[in-house]
Image (cartoon, rainbow, N blue to C red):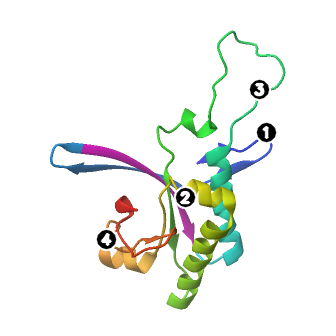
Amino acid sequence: MSHPLSDSEKVITDALMHYTLTGPGQRTKLRAFVEVDRTTMSSERLASKLIDYARLWSYEPQPAGRQRSRQPALSGPSWLRWYPVYPRILFVLTGGSRQVMDHRTSDLQAMVAQHPLVATMARTVPLGAAVLDDIETHGPTGDVWVPLRGGEPRSWTEL
């Protein structure tokens, strides 16, 4: 999935997940951007993907020149064209030892804590990371997702 950040830049997600959570008398539609990390890039580059998602979260295109249409220009972030709520961001980690995966999760958490735009986005957008082996063992809705704002592992639907 590709989303524009400007005329020359874009965010490309590995996957966009659509999920319907059902409960007694309730139905909730959830979406998540999914990034699969196979440890093929540096931990810093992985964490910097959060900056790209934060830029998409805040990006409001500016009209170029005169409007051709008499309709008012869309205002607000560009992602509102596709989603009623900004999707959660989930990192699935694989391809390394448990220690490597733990360090990558810590680097993602540090990006949330240290980068102002990412920190602002994280106040309203759920962010989590999980190790693929844990997802396979406990299931995708198991308590395997580490919230990137801190806290105990939980289901991705409860981030």
* Nearest to the observer: residue 153 or residue 18: 153
Percent position (x, y) of residue 53?
Answer: 63, 54
Q: CA distance from mark 2 to mark 3?
A: 28 Å
Kindly identify which residue carries mark 2.
122
Q: Nearer the viewer, mark 2 or mark 1?
A: 2
Q: Amino acid at mark 2?
A: Ala
Is 129 positioned to the left or the right of 22 in the image?
A: right
Q: Secondary structure at mark 2?
A: helix
- Tell me which numbered mark, 2 or 3, is placed earlier along the sequence: 3
User: Residue visible at 67% across and 21% down?
Assistant: 73
User: Residue visible at 47% across and 42% down?
Assistant: 85
Q: Which residues are magenta?
A: 27-37
Q: CA distance from mark 1 to mark 4?
A: 40 Å
Identify the main secondary structure in magenta. strand
Is 143 positioned to the left or the right of 149 in the image?
A: left
Q: Amino acid at mark 4?
A: Gly
Q: CA distance from mark 2 to mark 1?
A: 26 Å
How crowded pointer 3 is (Cα within 10 Å; few <14, some 14-19, many 20+) is rated as few
Residue 41 seen by the camera: no
Percent position (x, y) of residue 13?
Answer: 59, 55
- Tell me which numbered mark, 2 or 4, is placed earlier along the sequence: 2
Q: Nearer the viewer, mark 2 or mark 3?
A: 2
How crowded pointer 1 is (Cα within 10 Å; few <14, some 14-19, many 20+) is rated as few
Q: Secondary structure at mark 4?
A: loop
Kindly identify which residue carries mark 3.
63
Q: Amino acid at mark 3?
A: Pro
User: Residue visible at 16% across and 43% down?
Assistant: 25
Q: Amino acid at mark 1?
A: Asp
- Tell me which numbered mark, 1 or 4, is placed earlier along the sequence: 1
* Nearest to the observer: residue 15 or residue 150: 150
Magenta-span inclusion, residue 31: yes
Residue 102 seen by the camera: yes
